[in-house]
Image (cartoon, rainbow, N blue to C red):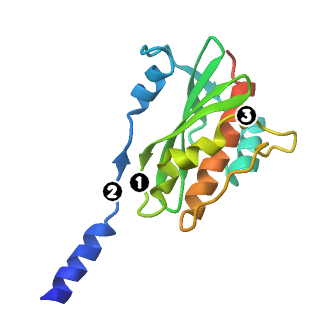
Amino acid sequence: MIRVLLAFAWMVAAAPGAQTVYQKPSEFIAGNFGGRLPEARALKLSAAHQAMMKRFLGHSYQPSTIRYWAVGGTFVVILDEIGKTQPITTGFVVKGGRIEEVKVLIYRESHGSEVSRSSFTKQFRKAGLGADGKLDRRVDGIAGATLSVRALTGLARVALYLDKVAPK
Protein backbone atom coordinates (compact mmCIF):
# COMPACT_ATOMS: atom_id res chain seq x y z
CA MET A 1 0.00 0.00 0.00
CA ILE A 2 2.83 2.39 0.88
CA ARG A 3 4.49 1.69 -2.49
CA VAL A 4 1.25 2.50 -4.29
CA LEU A 5 0.90 5.79 -2.40
CA LEU A 6 4.52 6.71 -3.04
CA ALA A 7 4.15 5.90 -6.74
CA PHE A 8 0.99 8.02 -6.93
CA ALA A 9 2.67 10.93 -5.13
CA TRP A 10 5.62 10.76 -7.53
CA MET A 11 3.32 10.77 -10.58
CA VAL A 12 1.41 13.80 -9.30
CA ALA A 13 4.65 15.70 -8.56
CA ALA A 14 6.01 14.90 -12.02
CA ALA A 15 2.77 15.69 -13.85
CA PRO A 16 3.23 18.02 -16.82
CA GLY A 17 1.30 21.24 -16.95
CA ALA A 18 2.07 22.32 -13.39
CA GLN A 19 2.74 26.02 -13.30
CA THR A 20 3.18 28.82 -10.84
CA VAL A 21 1.86 32.23 -11.83
CA TYR A 22 3.74 34.89 -9.89
CA GLN A 23 2.13 37.80 -11.71
CA LYS A 24 -0.11 38.19 -14.74
CA PRO A 25 1.77 39.69 -17.69
CA SER A 26 -0.81 42.49 -18.04
CA GLU A 27 -0.28 43.45 -14.38
CA PHE A 28 3.49 43.50 -14.85
CA ILE A 29 3.17 45.76 -17.88
CA ALA A 30 0.69 48.14 -16.25
CA GLY A 31 2.77 48.25 -13.08
CA ASN A 32 5.65 49.70 -15.04
CA PHE A 33 3.52 52.40 -16.66
CA GLY A 34 1.81 53.95 -13.65
CA GLY A 35 -1.01 51.43 -13.50
CA ARG A 36 -2.18 51.85 -17.08
CA LEU A 37 -1.70 49.41 -19.93
CA PRO A 38 -0.30 51.31 -22.94
CA GLU A 39 -0.90 50.22 -26.49
CA ALA A 40 1.21 47.26 -27.54
CA ARG A 41 3.63 47.58 -30.42
CA ALA A 42 4.95 44.74 -32.54
CA LEU A 43 8.31 43.94 -34.05
CA LYS A 44 8.42 41.42 -36.86
CA LEU A 45 11.70 39.56 -36.55
CA SER A 46 13.72 39.83 -39.75
CA ALA A 47 16.39 37.34 -40.79
CA ALA A 48 18.99 39.63 -39.17
CA HIS A 49 16.97 39.76 -35.94
CA GLN A 50 16.62 35.97 -35.93
CA ALA A 51 20.38 35.61 -36.44
CA MET A 52 20.99 37.72 -33.34
CA MET A 53 18.35 35.78 -31.36
CA LYS A 54 20.05 32.56 -32.37
CA ARG A 55 23.34 33.96 -31.15
CA PHE A 56 21.80 34.83 -27.78
CA LEU A 57 19.61 31.75 -27.29
CA GLY A 58 21.22 29.07 -29.45
CA HIS A 59 18.10 28.80 -31.61
CA SER A 60 15.65 30.92 -33.57
CA TYR A 61 13.00 32.62 -31.47
CA GLN A 62 9.37 31.69 -31.90
CA PRO A 63 7.03 33.43 -32.49
CA SER A 64 8.37 35.58 -35.30
CA THR A 65 6.64 38.73 -34.05
CA ILE A 66 7.33 40.15 -30.60
CA ARG A 67 4.96 42.45 -28.76
CA TYR A 68 6.44 45.17 -26.59
CA TRP A 69 5.46 48.38 -24.81
CA ALA A 70 7.49 51.59 -24.96
CA VAL A 71 6.58 54.90 -23.37
CA GLY A 72 8.83 57.75 -22.25
CA GLY A 73 12.10 55.84 -22.35
CA THR A 74 10.71 52.72 -20.66
CA PHE A 75 10.78 49.55 -22.76
CA VAL A 76 8.85 46.51 -21.48
CA VAL A 77 8.80 43.10 -23.13
CA ILE A 78 7.44 39.72 -22.08
CA LEU A 79 9.45 36.79 -23.41
CA ASP A 80 9.24 33.00 -23.19
CA GLU A 81 12.14 30.56 -23.24
CA ILE A 82 12.33 26.85 -22.56
CA GLY A 83 14.18 25.96 -19.38
CA LYS A 84 14.51 22.21 -19.55
CA THR A 85 11.22 21.23 -21.17
CA GLN A 86 8.71 24.00 -20.42
CA PRO A 87 8.57 27.72 -21.20
CA ILE A 88 9.47 30.29 -18.56
CA THR A 89 7.53 33.53 -19.07
CA THR A 90 9.61 36.50 -17.98
CA GLY A 91 9.04 40.25 -17.96
CA PHE A 92 11.86 42.71 -18.63
CA VAL A 93 12.01 46.46 -18.12
CA VAL A 94 14.82 48.30 -19.93
CA LYS A 95 15.64 52.00 -19.51
CA GLY A 96 18.59 53.75 -21.09
CA GLY A 97 19.98 50.51 -22.51
CA ARG A 98 20.14 48.91 -19.04
CA ILE A 99 17.90 46.35 -17.39
CA GLU A 100 15.86 47.91 -14.64
CA GLU A 101 13.79 44.87 -13.69
CA VAL A 102 13.51 41.18 -14.44
CA LYS A 103 10.57 39.20 -13.12
CA VAL A 104 9.62 35.60 -13.74
CA LEU A 105 5.88 35.83 -14.33
CA ILE A 106 5.00 32.17 -14.99
CA TYR A 107 7.21 29.21 -14.14
CA ARG A 108 6.26 25.80 -15.53
CA GLU A 109 9.30 23.58 -14.86
CA SER A 110 9.44 20.99 -12.09
CA HIS A 111 12.92 22.15 -10.97
CA GLY A 112 14.83 25.40 -10.88
CA SER A 113 12.11 27.75 -9.67
CA GLU A 114 14.78 29.53 -7.62
CA VAL A 115 15.28 31.76 -10.69
CA SER A 116 12.00 33.44 -9.78
CA ARG A 117 13.40 34.73 -6.47
CA SER A 118 14.39 38.37 -6.29
CA SER A 119 17.75 37.30 -4.84
CA PHE A 120 18.48 35.84 -8.29
CA THR A 121 16.74 38.31 -10.61
CA LYS A 122 18.29 41.38 -8.94
CA GLN A 123 21.63 40.30 -10.43
CA PHE A 124 20.37 41.54 -13.82
CA ARG A 125 19.70 45.10 -12.61
CA LYS A 126 21.78 47.69 -14.45
CA ALA A 127 23.12 45.05 -16.86
CA GLY A 128 23.78 46.20 -20.39
CA LEU A 129 24.71 44.42 -23.58
CA GLY A 130 28.45 44.46 -24.32
CA ALA A 131 29.96 44.77 -27.79
CA ASP A 132 30.51 40.99 -27.71
CA GLY A 133 26.76 40.39 -27.26
CA LYS A 134 27.14 39.25 -23.66
CA LEU A 135 25.86 40.87 -20.50
CA ASP A 136 28.35 43.36 -19.10
CA ARG A 137 27.92 41.99 -15.60
CA ARG A 138 28.25 38.54 -14.11
CA VAL A 139 25.16 36.51 -13.22
CA ASP A 140 25.80 33.72 -10.74
CA GLY A 141 24.18 30.37 -11.44
CA ILE A 142 22.05 28.25 -9.13
CA ALA A 143 22.90 24.61 -8.46
CA GLY A 144 20.11 22.47 -9.89
CA ALA A 145 18.72 25.28 -12.03
CA THR A 146 21.38 25.55 -14.72
CA LEU A 147 18.98 25.41 -17.67
CA SER A 148 16.61 27.95 -16.12
CA VAL A 149 19.55 30.28 -15.41
CA ARG A 150 20.71 29.95 -19.02
CA ALA A 151 17.18 30.66 -20.25
CA LEU A 152 16.86 33.88 -18.24
CA THR A 153 20.37 35.03 -19.13
CA GLY A 154 19.65 34.49 -22.83
CA LEU A 155 16.34 36.32 -22.54
CA ALA A 156 18.05 39.25 -20.79
CA ARG A 157 20.38 39.57 -23.77
CA VAL A 158 17.37 39.41 -26.12
CA ALA A 159 15.49 42.08 -24.15
CA LEU A 160 18.47 44.45 -24.32
CA TYR A 161 18.86 43.81 -28.05
CA LEU A 162 15.16 44.40 -28.69
CA ASP A 163 15.33 47.67 -26.79
CA LYS A 164 18.00 48.79 -29.28
CA VAL A 165 16.23 47.70 -32.47
CA ALA A 166 12.51 48.12 -31.76
CA PRO A 167 10.93 51.34 -33.04
CA LYS A 168 9.87 53.57 -30.20
Question: Which of pointers 2 and 1 lies earlier in the amino acid sequence?
Answer: 2
Numbered circle sitting on residue 18: 2
- Type of amino acid at the residue the image marks with label 1: Arg
Identify the mark nearer the N-term, 1 or 3: 1
> How many angstroms separate mark 3 from mark 2 (CA)?
31 Å
Residue 161, disc: 3
Q: Which badge, 3 or 2, comes first in the chain's sequence?
A: 2
Quarter of the image where the C terminus is located:
top right
Q: Measure the alpha-carbon separation of dots 2 and 1.
A: 6 Å
- Residue at x 43%, y 32% (from the top left corner): 25
Q: Amino acid at mark 3?
A: Tyr
Question: Which numbered disc covers residue 74?
Answer: none
**What residue would you read off at disc 1?**
108
Query: Do labels 2 and 1 touch, CB within 8 Å?
Result: yes
Query: Dot 2 lies on which element?
Result: loop
Q: Whole-Å distance between the Cαs marked 1 and 3?
A: 25 Å
